Image: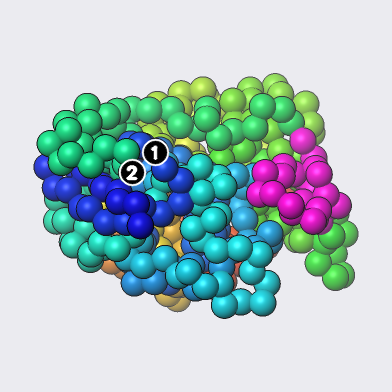
């Protein structure tokens, strides 16, 4: 098989077998501890600008299919696994992981000790890296990694947000390719016993489709607006609630998003997830900081401080809200039990809540799905 290599900015180089497409890419190298859900991970816009290493020893066991996608295309810069399964075992599979990556142009690497990469990242923190099947000379790769742009300070939301507004509809086509967009299929039906009675505007900073599915199945008509939309553009749709989506990159460079959230605060109920959580905090005067190696996986324990219950959650973020800068207007509602960071916030006077993790859980546990019902109750 063709060779490929990953170089980190600290001078470490890992050489193995090429996976997926040929080429050379750079990005922040991070890791995800999920054992399943790799197709949802690959299509999550929050991974824009990153080279992801999976910790599970074999990825691709059940192949890929048309349904397990979270956006219209594969999003990350590169993909690293210990072993990519060459056989798709599940009856729903329409192809293998290798073919899926190659068709989408995603450069990958396999046949290396992914435990060594994860250990280095946990000790030294997330680093910029270069993944290549074209350049294999270690010294040159390391120099390329050191010259590549860092993730901090980059506006990656502009690369993944939609260009135009749309009314959310579930892509229910035959899925001949993974390049479908909302609106090309039928409307997502509400759950039995519910009717679409609430108008929600979702500000899309790189929204996972399963979030819109949850909102729609809970009885909401969802209008998706580009994350750059202004306060007036949002209010023109007369929403009964505003959803702030997940998305990639550094939240503190997104001034245009923060201004909109600040202008909507107190005028309409709001619910933010992941990047949306961080934007709500910034709009209220808090700051964010870069986590050492982030939270990425489907087994993060989070405590609901109001109930004392622990939720096992799906997470994907590299930044967090700085608790020392938290204004008095915000109350912490959820906390990560691994490192104590803030996982949920509630505004004390305005109808606005947020969580750092992913209650839509695609893929992942469903412990936190109640948060979508809470948002609907806020709009009642």
Above or below, 78 against 367 in this view is above
Task: Identify the magenta region.
Answer: 166-188
Name the side, left or right, on which 343 lies relative to 346.
left
- Residue 283: tell me if it is visible: no
Is 259 inside the magenta-drawn segment? no
Q: Quadrant of residue 316?
A: bottom left
Q: How is the image coloured?
A: rainbow
Q: Position of residue 300 (x, y in %)?
A: 38, 67
Name the side, left or right, on which 19 lies relative to 181.
left
Estimate how packed mark 2 is, as few (under 14), some (14 to 19) or many (20 or more) residues with alpha carbons within 10 Å.
many
Above or below, 364 against 286 in this view is below
Element under disc 2:
loop
Q: Which mark is residue 133?
A: 2
- Residue 238: tell me if it is visible: yes
Is 186 inside the magenta-drawn segment? yes
> On the image, numbered disc 1 is attached to which residue?
23
Q: Which mark is residue 347?
A: none
């Amino acid at each position: 098989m063709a060779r490929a290599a990953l170089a980190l900015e600290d001078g470490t180089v890992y050489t193995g077998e090429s996976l997926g497409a040929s080429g050379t890419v750079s990005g922040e190298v991070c890791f995800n501890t999920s054992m399943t859900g790799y197709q949802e991970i690959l299509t999550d816009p929050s991974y824009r600008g990153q080279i992801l290493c999976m910790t599970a020893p074999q990825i691709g066991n059940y192949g890929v299919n048309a349904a397990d996608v979270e956006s219209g295309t594969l999003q990350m810069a590169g993909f690293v696994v210990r072993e990519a399964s060459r056989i798709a075992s599940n009856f729903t599979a329409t192809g293998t992981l290798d073919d899926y990556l190659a068709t989408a142009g995603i450069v990958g690497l396999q046949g290396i000790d992914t435990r060594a990469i994860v250990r280095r990242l946990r000790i030294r923190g997330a680093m910029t890296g270069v993944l290549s099947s074209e350049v294999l000379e270690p010294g040159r790769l390391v120099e390329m990694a050191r010259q590549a742009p860092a993730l901090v300070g980059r506006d990656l939301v502009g690369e993944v947000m939609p260009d135009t507004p749309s009314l959310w509809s579930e892509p229910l086509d035959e899925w001949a390719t993974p390049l479908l967009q909302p609106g090309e299929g039928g409307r997502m039906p509400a759950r039995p016993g519910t009717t679409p009675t609430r108008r929600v505007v979702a500000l899309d900073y790189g929204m996972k489709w399963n979030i819109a599915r949850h909102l729609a199945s809970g009885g909401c008509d969802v209008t998706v607006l580009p994350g750059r939309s202004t306060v007036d553009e949002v209010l023109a749709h007369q929403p009964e609630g505003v959803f702030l989506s997940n998305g990639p990159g550094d939240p503190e460079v997104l001034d245009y998003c923060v201004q909109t959230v600040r202008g909507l605060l107190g005028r309409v109920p709001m619910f933010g997830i992941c990047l949306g959580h961080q934007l709500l905090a910034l709009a209220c005067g808090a700051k964010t900081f870069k986590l050492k190696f982030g939270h990425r996986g489907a087994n993060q324990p989070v405590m609901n401080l109001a109930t004392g219950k622990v939720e096992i959650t799906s997470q994907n973020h590299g930044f967090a809200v700085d608790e020392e800068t938290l204004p008095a207007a915000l109350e912490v509602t959820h906390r990560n039990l691994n490192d104590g960071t803030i996982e949920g916030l509630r505004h004390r006077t305005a109808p606005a809540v947020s969580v750092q993790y992913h209650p839509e859980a695609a893929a992942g546990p469903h412990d936190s799905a109640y948060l979508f019902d809470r948002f609907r109750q806020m709009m009642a």
